[in-house]
Amino acid sequence: MRIFDPHIHMTSRTTDDYEAMYAAGVRGLVEPSFWLGQPRTSVGSFVDYFDGLVGWERFRAAQFGIAHHATIALNPKEANDPRCIEVLDVLPRYLAKDGVVAVGELGFDSMTADEEKAFVRQLELAAEHDLPVLVHTPHRDKAAGTRRTLELVAASPLPPNRVLVDHLNETTVGMVVDTGCWMGFSIYPDTKMDEHRMVRILAERGLDRMLVNSAADWGRSDPLKTAKTGAAMLEAGFEADDVDRVLWRNPVEFYGQSGRLLLDMAPPEPTFAGNTILRGERASGAA
Amino acid sequence: MTTLDSVDPRASAALEPAARERLETLCAQLAGDPIQIRVLMPAAARLVGRGPLDPADPQGLLGATLDDAVRGALLVTLAGALAGDTDRLVAEIRDLYRFGDADEKRAVLRALHRLTPGPAYLDLVADALRTNDVRLVAAALGPYGAKHLDAETWRQGVLKCLFVGVPLSAVAALDSRSDALLADMIAAYVYERVAAGRDVPADVWRVLDVHPKAVEESGVLAELDSPYADRRTAAERALAGRTDRATTGREA
């Protein structure tokens, strides 16, 4: 089983996770920029975080044979803080980077006017930089948030096939399925979705534009939920090719629209004895 | 001769004619409008090319990768375009490093010695030496670091290479800058590894073979008589890397 996790916050995870993910078949992933749990109080804090996503975290992942990519944005929660809003001026530098494959996570947290303003501006930035977008749908008031999200996307310069609407469930998937947007499902130990409900949705709605992610972060979450969903699909009678489509080809097709996926990875090399820093590193072929 | 030829003839030979032409177009664009460097630097690898130039050096620790050389050509072009305004050039280069991803940062480090003669970028090198990204550490100890780093920082950088697994052949001017103090630091490191029953990189002998006294004073030789088998064998393995055994008076 080869797996591309289209949404996982590796900055919050350990090297044990990277090892377990590689063993389960994960070879590529996207880490969306988001809230850190502790609110940021300055633009500098964002910039250091973005640097980590395109620098250290990509290096760390490569040591475990996993191609790391990022999405960059001002997240909805912090769009409400005037001390953070100026990060929008810095975004163009990061939206030009190799391995930055979308603008995200955008969207709503509490559906405020400030959130909507940042959301709309960043949809424009995505169009200007020829990048797709990853849209977070809110935990609270999800149906209303998803509806408003789809209105803003429809009014934006982006075609729907460049938009991934994430954290969907049984009550919101129906709104998105006919829009042409891609549909993301975060499989969690006890909130959002579980793998068996996911299989049911796939059986009912088909595999077209469907993405499954672990969205693992610093909360209770499981970076192997993608693999577990693959196993649940096989148990339920899906073919290996169906699993490959949902867990690899679909996310690669969506983020591949950026033209910036870096999937040509060398397998990890053995550690230098006693050292926590491995010698292995990305060896991509000449373009 | 193109700018890329002057930066790295291997890179020039590795590029397809179409890619070489794209790079020349980018350089011409940059010469006319230097501020373009801010978008061309991040985009250079996907527009022109990337990957190792030497299959034996897939990470680009020992020398430039193709993308390093391509970005180097852009930086040299920028330096030419801003030749009359050193302050502006320095500020632009510092921002490229500040906002660069790890690949861009590495390319800046590899190009520094071609940009301005002075130590204006020394803090960028210091920043790279504080990271644990082996590619940045290796590039920081290239020709610019060799010329401008003070002895103390340079020695710490070389020791860090041994710790994180950067081969010492990545270090520019290793032989001419190595001194007895560096040898003492490396010998102490070897002793610490051996006392823990661990291996040391064979590279330590590139410095220690020239400074046998450091080994004699380090306590490593006494480990050959350690009551613990793991320490004895670790000492034997470590000392087997020497090329100049006679000076220590012992056969490992």
Image (cartoon, coloured by chain):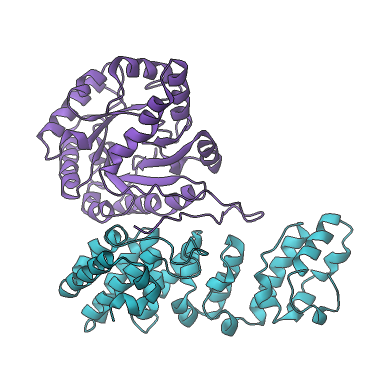
Chain colours: A purple, B cyan
Residue furthest out toward the left: A155
Q: How many marks?
A: 0
Expressed as whole percent of the image width and height from the top left, the position of residue A52 reads: 40, 52
When asked about the image quadrant of residue A279, the answer is bottom right
- Can see residue A234? yes
Expressed as whole percent of the image width and height from the top left, the position of residue B61 reads: 50, 66
When asked about the image quadrant of residue B36, the answer is bottom left
Q: Is residue B7 left or right of residue A141?
A: right
Q: Is residue A53 above or below residue A195?
A: below
- Can see residue A220? no
Q: Is residue B39 above or below residue A196?
A: below
Q: Is residue B248 above or below residue B138?
A: below
When asked about the image quadrant of residue B245, the answer is bottom right
Q: Is residue B11 left or right of residue A163?
A: right
Expressed as whole percent of the image width and height from the top left, the position of residue A198 reads: 37, 19
Q: Nearer the viewer, residue A287 or A149?
A: A287
Residue at (63% x, 82% y) in the render: B179
Q: Is residue A4 left or right of residue B242?
A: left
Q: Nearer the viewer, residue A83 or A279?
A: A279
Residue at (68% x, 68% y) in the render: B202
Residue furthest out toward the front: B17
Q: Is residue A191 left or right of residue A102?
A: right
Expressed as whole percent of the image width and height from the top left, the position of residue A72 reads: 29, 46
Quadrant of the image containing the C terminus of chain A: bottom left
